[in-house]
Image (cartoon, grey):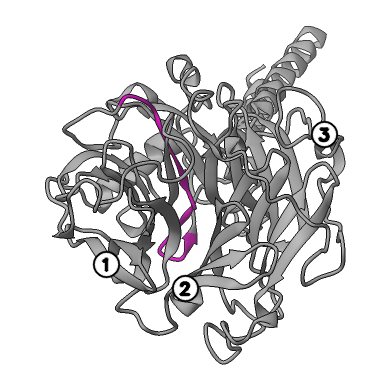
Amino acid sequence: MRRTVLPTLFVALLLAVPVAGATGGLASTDPGAGAAPGAGLATAGLQGASNPCVGTIERTPERTTLFSIQGAYQGEKTSAMVVGARPNGSIVGVHNDTAAGRWWSYDIDVLDNGNILQATTYNRDTQIEEIDPETGEHVSVRHFDGVYDTHDVDLINGDELLMNDMSQDGEDRVLVYNLTQEAITWEYYFANYTEHYPKSGGGEFGGDWTHNNDVEKVGDGTFMVSVRNFDKVVAIDRETKEVEWTLGSDDNTSILHEQHNPDYLESEDGNATVIVADSLNDRVVEYEREGDEWNRTWVLRGGNLDEPRDADRLPNGNTLIADRRAHRIVEVTPDGEVVWEVYSPYQPYDVERVGTGDESSGPTMADIGEGGVAEPTGSADFDADAIAACYDYLTGFESTRLIPDEDLAAIGASGTATADGGTDAADGSGGDGAEGEGADGGDGDDTGSRSGDDSLLGTTTSGSGPTPLGAALAVGAVAAALAGALVRRRRN
């Protein structure tokens, strides 16, 4: 018995451990890998330990905070995730994109039906997903071949996806994909407008040239786009493709320097206002347009801010920030006081407060009588070891739920991208490309017709998200080994 069972158990455990550990640790270098080897088993015990991801908590918000984690640290690939954190900083759950075979985690939005819209990548192409907040499962997946590394996606006008595309060979664009027609119905190629984006500017033409990383509908028929490598934000008329206004200019880094995720606000006087994560200036900055001039009305800098990626103005006038290289989410008052802080390794990309609507939904600094330069104060002391402990805790977390029951009721009443009532439907011209150019709207079982109340993307899937399949197979292998050993023992 001992000669038979022990070697068999040893082999079975060798099979089981890598599979069961697939939800944590450093990821495989294969973009299509379905699992990341590492810390899943080692960190499972942390589930019952105190939460190491909490920093300063001076005031607790009313509802859950969601944030995406891109997944990279010091040149190594780490787990890409979406995380839900309660007002007290405790973790609701973790949706591990790496364990589901995805590579990066980017923009997240809470839809009217409570599901979470996410931009991610699979084998370098864009994948747009709809996540059930109660289970963490994908209820809808659309794969876009040839649409590269989309950082931002919004559902507008009920059945359109507004997306950026960082394709190669100078094909950088923003586009609208119509879910009803299952086709791209509008495109804006930056290379066709070299008066605004000269090929000699930005990055290397034919490579990551514009690195346009964010697009937002800011009014009927107007899209605001962050053109990162040109250090500027532009507003584009959907029908004419004219540039209505520009904030910043190439290499004038005193205004913007390779920014991310600008949000559009309007002052009480009707002035266009933009709050932006001014990444390589290590600050968050707000500009208000008066006439043809942009005036800088507020700056948040210092206080360990390190290449922020997202900044949302909340209804209470505070600003919620994804602080990329500090690996944290912080909420700060207009004068810079840190009132809420949760760690988010490695490299948070986007953050949303449940129930406050899509993007920024609060007042401008001018409207609340604030302005000038502020420095974040009151952050908790943290170091690389504290961040690493938080990463282990998140990758070992068992629950995949992202929004608790008490917050789901608040979602339908909030203003979101799907309830904007816009009328700028596509004209069907196809824009700078071919009319009604198609896109791959899914692969395998992830495709389907637009139907059902559970999905706003219109595709229904099953079993496409993080599942316990790997662990089940591992347990099955051990059970089979034990059964085989017992049979052999009876025969002997």
Q: Secondary structure at mark 2?
A: strand
Indicate yes or no whether the magenta region holds residue 71. yes
Q: For mark 3, what is the residue?
A: 450
The quarter in which the C terminus is drawn is: top right
Q: Residue at x 56, y 21 (%)?
A: 134
User: From the viewer's perspective, is 380 left or right of 281?
Assistant: left
Q: Which residues are magenta?
A: 62-76
Identity, as a three-letter code, of the amino acid under mark 3: Arg
Give above or below for 174 relative to 378.
below
The residue pinned by badge 2 equals 246
Residue type, label 1: Arg
Q: Residue at x 28, y 69 (%)?
A: 295
Whether 204 is drawn above or below 11: the answer is: below
Relative to the observer, which residue lies in front, 112 or 431?
Answer: 431
Label at residue 60? none
Q: Are marks 3 and 1 in contact (CB under 8 Å)?
A: no
**Residue located beneath label 1 in the image:** 296
| Left or right position of 395 against 117 | left
Circle 3: element type: loop
One can see residue 310 in this view: yes
Q: Give the number of the mark in front: 3 or 1.
A: 1
Q: Are marks 2 and 3 in contact (CB under 8 Å)?
A: no
**Residue 181: x and y, percent?**
86, 46
Residue drawn at point x = 81 percent, y = 48 percent? 441
